[in-house]
Amino acid sequence: MNRWPVGIPLYVVLDAPDSVFSEIWPQTAVDYATRSRRVHEYLSGEANGGLKVHRTDFTTRMSDPFDLAPPVRDLALSLLCYGDYDEVPDGKKPIVRDAILKHKEDGFVRCACSCYELLRR
């Protein structure tokens, strides 16, 4: 932390806590989901190392991968799952599909993101 100059911003962009990713990753990428949740907690908490933190939320979107043809379908699903969709256990695939459909609007999957601007004091 001492090598990070005072007053120079660092930007960290993550899935938002209520995003499609945050809903899917506990099923498909548990370690990443845990790290993401912990980073949000750290940056939003009082004990964040004395950083000045400003959070801006924004939304992006992607086509519903189930509406796409392979190989684009597989690439989009791997992004959403943080891994190969084919390796997701069959019992968890309905959970992934339901999460995607829950976040679908006008043919697109809504991807909520959070950008943290960090300043060392």
Image (cartoon, rainbow, N blue to C red):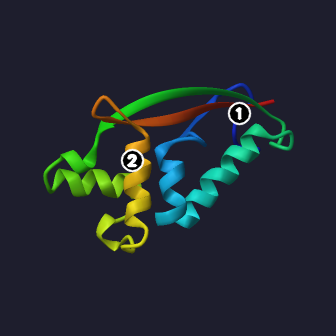
Question: Looking at the image, which residue is at 18% across and 47% down?
Answer: 68
Give yes or no for contact between labels 1 and 2 (Cβ–Cβ under 8 Å): no
Q: Residue 112 in the image: x percent, y percent?
A: 49, 35
User: In front here: 87 or 45?
Assistant: 87
**Would you call the spot at circle 2 few (<14 residues within 10 Å), some (14-19), or many (20 or more)?**
many
Q: Residue 34 in the image: x percent, y percent?
A: 63, 60
Q: In the picture provided, is 43 more to the left or to the right than 67?
A: right
Question: Looking at the image, which residue is at 57% across and 41% down?
Answer: 18
User: In front here: 115 or 16?
Assistant: 16
Q: Amino acid at mark 2?
A: Ile
Question: Looking at the image, which residue is at 81% across and 41% down?
Answer: 45
Q: In the picture provided, is 102 more to the left or to the right than 37?
A: left
Which tag is nearer the camera, tag 1 or tag 2? 2
Q: In the picture provided, is 47 more to the left or to the right than 16?
A: right
Q: Which residue is mark 1?
A: 5
Q: Secondary structure at mark 2?
A: helix
Q: Which residue is mark 2?
A: 100
Whether 45 is drawn above or below 79: the answer is above
Q: Earlier in the sequence, mark 1 or mark 2?
A: 1
User: In front here: 9 or 6?
Assistant: 9
Quarter of the figure that contains the C terminus:
top right
Q: In the picture provided, is 66 more to the left or to the right than 92?
A: left
Whether 52 is drawn above or below 72: the answer is above
Residue 44 in sight in this render: yes
Checking the image for residue 79, the label placed there is none
The Cα atoms of the two marked residues, 1 and 2, are separated by: 41 Å
